[in-house]
Amino acid sequence: MTSTPVAMVLHGGAGVLAKKSYEREVTHMRGLAARGKAMLNDGRSALDVVETIVYELEVSGLYVAGKGSSPNTDNRYELDAAIMDGETRNAGAVAAMEGFVSPVMAARKVMESTPHVMLAGWGANRLAEREGLERVEEPESYYVPAAVPDGRAYATGTVGCVALDAQGRLAAATSTGGTLKKTPGRVGDCPLIGAGTWADQDIAVSCTGQGEFFIRSLAAGTVAARIRYLHESPEEAAQWALKDVKRLGGDGGIIAVGRDGRIATPYNSEGMKCAVLHADGRITAGVQELS
Ligand code: ASP
């Protein structure tokens, strides 16, 4: 068994309001980075860590995922999530699922309890039910939708986490309530393996931003392909993928961690809420803002 430095990045979305204080989110994310550090130093797998951290982000109600999700135009809450294990390239995802507290836990059940990669709509709900996952009994009182930045038709606050564990394994998970006032049935990039979420033996990636552009540019898969075929660093590859998103007219952010512990957190939106456990053990957290 090899032992490598551990590293982790988590994000709380690429949408920020210019005048809003994100003190609560930053404190929360810093705490989760410390929690991830403890888990990784304890020998927990990258897969367990990304699931746990994304679950905590979902139930906090501070981001546009899980409890903080936005309703669609029918005033219903349809949530997307994915998880991927870089070591085995097993993956699980749920799309437009309703009525459960943790889409990321449902995504892991798809990965481990079915022969499939993605379940959508009522099929995802039925699996979650069968697996005994926690239900949202009263959507109206449970969800606390986030505010929308001025001039934006959507709220971006997807959550995600990428991690490298002590055995050199990588994993990624992403969860979202999607875009505000989305069309019923709309599915974003997060649950699409290779668009918003990816992990292999070299890199783990989670994206946030206008999902349609991340799908059309195959953002997460592009980061991985550039590393595999062009031997770029995580930063170079993620920057390139974001530029491609921009060329199509979108914006957002990408978090990534490589197998040597190098991380990348580029964004080209107004900012991105994120926290990093660096390979040297330092923890940093903040809302990076372009000015
Ligand atoms: N990527 C998400 C989606 O399009 C939104 C976000 O990142 O906040 O569903």
Image (cartoon, rainbow, N blue to C red):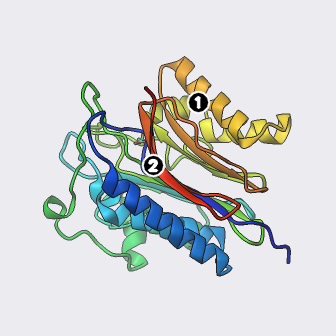
Image quadrant assignment for residue 147? top left
Which disc, if any, is residue 272? Answer: none
Residue at which label 1 appears: 242
Q: Is residue 106 visible?
A: no
On whether ligand 1 comes within 8 Å of the CB at mark 1, the answer is no
Q: Residue at x 29, y 45 (%)?
A: 21
Which image quarter is the C terminus in?
A: top left
Image quadrant assignment for residue 162? bottom right
Q: Residues within 10 Å of mark 2 (few under 14, many from 20)?
A: some
Q: Is residue 210 above or below residue 137?
A: above
Point out residue 204 in the picture as x, y percentages from the top left corner. 66, 52
Q: Residues within 10 Å of mark 1 (few under 14, many from 20)?
A: many
Q: Residue at x 69, y 38 (%)?
A: 235
Point out residue 9 in the picture as x, y percentages from the top left corner. 57, 55
Query: Which mark is in front, 1 or 2?
Result: 2
Instruction: Please state which amino acid type lies under the numbered disc 2.
Output: Gly
For this rendering, which residue is in front, 147 or 142? 147
Q: Residue at x 61, y 35 (%)?
A: 218
What SS does tag 2 mark?
strand
Residue at which label 2 appears: 286
